[in-house]
Amino acid sequence: MADLEGLLVVSLEQAVAAPYASCKLADAGARVIKVERPEGDFARGYDSLVEGQSAYFVWLNRGKESVALDLKSEPDRALLRAIVSEADVFIQNFAPGAVDRLGLGAAELCALHPRLIYCSISGYGDAGPYRDQKAYDLLVQAESGLLSVNGTPDASVRVGISVCDITAGLTAYAAILQSLIQRGRTGKGRHIEVSLFHAIADWMNVPYLQTRYGHKPPQRVGLRHPTIAPYGVFTCGDGKQVLLAIQNEREWARFCADVLHDPALQTDQRFATNIARVANLEALEAAVHAVLGTMTREAAIARLEAGGIAYGRLSSLDDLVHHPQNNLVTVRTDGGEIELLAPGASFPGEAPVQFGPVPAVGEYTEALRREFSGPQPEGAAAPRRVAGE
């Protein structure tokens, strides 16, 4: 039996943040009903690079049942309310106020269904002066200060994935699981509020604290680390690049002896402590380049491994496609079977997780209308019981 089997999740969702949260619930065995507009989630049209389908949509929507509803229509709103009446979890990431106008707001649904866990995902939350401001991922990267610490000294650079959306989705997933545990103890649901801004702001606490209390905002340093050295990318003699990371003085001593073959650097006053190394970064990196620049990358890696020094290859996306550490899963789509990189958590010794197919727009609409519309004829399956009852 899957971990969340028996739970019903209804997600009025689009784009990335809410679909990420509901995808994780589906992976864990919950039944997830994805409510789309009649034309479908607009993330279906982000690109057509995966056998004619959107990479975002294929990634985030496996194992869900798609129902296409026109929520301006009272019969479709009534159907959604009927489905929600049996749900354990309701997720929505529409603009603030939109679900209230549809009669699907948190106050109304939680009053009607006290066991319901209602999760709202928005850009800036349901209160505050930015409540109604549009909040796409790049805009929140900018507003949250993330772009001030990401990039080179000359320019800010967008984080190359939808990091604010993903962070909000992961935060919502964790809060939903926490609330399911709480409901198991108390029998009561709750309203969860997650925003892109607040989710990524939590991740910004180190630069926030350094700025507020240390009055030293971290600078954009490209592939270097703002407060640790040596920590960054170095070009080897064959033109290939390797990243290395020294975290403490023991590692620095080993690095000097086993990689640079120059133990005297350990006690050089310019490099004797991490603070001194950061202050003398140019001279430090010149000393490292003087050695690594004469070696092939694989020869440098052999020394780094022998010294127990952390390192990584600077990989391209093609390198990722062929990376020897990849774990892959297969999902079925309208375009055929697709291989995805597997979720980060696995459960050794247990049967592999089975991932459901990616639905077409409204693929389950008629089946769900039959299931949730009005009394069932004699002999029909009994109404579904809410998990935990």
Image (cartoon, rainbow, N blue to C red):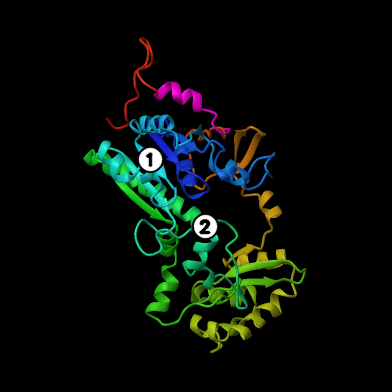
User: Is disc 1 placed on a helix, strand or loop?
Assistant: strand
Residue 351 spot, x, y in % from top left: 49, 33
Q: Residues within 10 Å of mark 1 (few under 14, many from 20)?
A: many
Q: How many marks?
A: 2
The residue to which callout 2 is attached is 136
* Relative to 375, residue 347 above or below: below
User: Do we see residue 347 in this rendering?
Assistant: no
**As drawn, is 95 to the left or to the right of 375?**
right
Which of the 4 image quarters holds residue 168? bottom left
CB of mark 2 within 8 Å of CB of mark 1? no
Q: Is residue 297 magenta?
A: no
The residue to which callout 1 is attached is 90
Q: Amino acid at mark 2?
A: Tyr
Q: Nearer the viewer, residue 184 or 300?
A: 184
Write the residue at 55% across / 61% down.
138
As measured in the structure, the alpha-carbon distance from the residue carrying label 2 to the one carrying label 1 is 22 Å
Residue 144 spot, x, y in % from top left: 46, 67
Q: Amino acid at mark 1?
A: Phe
- Considering the image in quadrants, where does the C terminus appear? top left
Q: What residue span does the magenta drawing correspond to?
A: 360-372
Residue 87 spot, x, y in % from top left: 35, 34
- Considering the image in quadrants, where does the N terminus appear? top left
Q: Residue furthest top?
A: 378
* Relative to 162, residue 236 above or below: below
- Residue 151, numbered label: none
Q: Nearer the viewer, residue 103 or 346?
A: 103
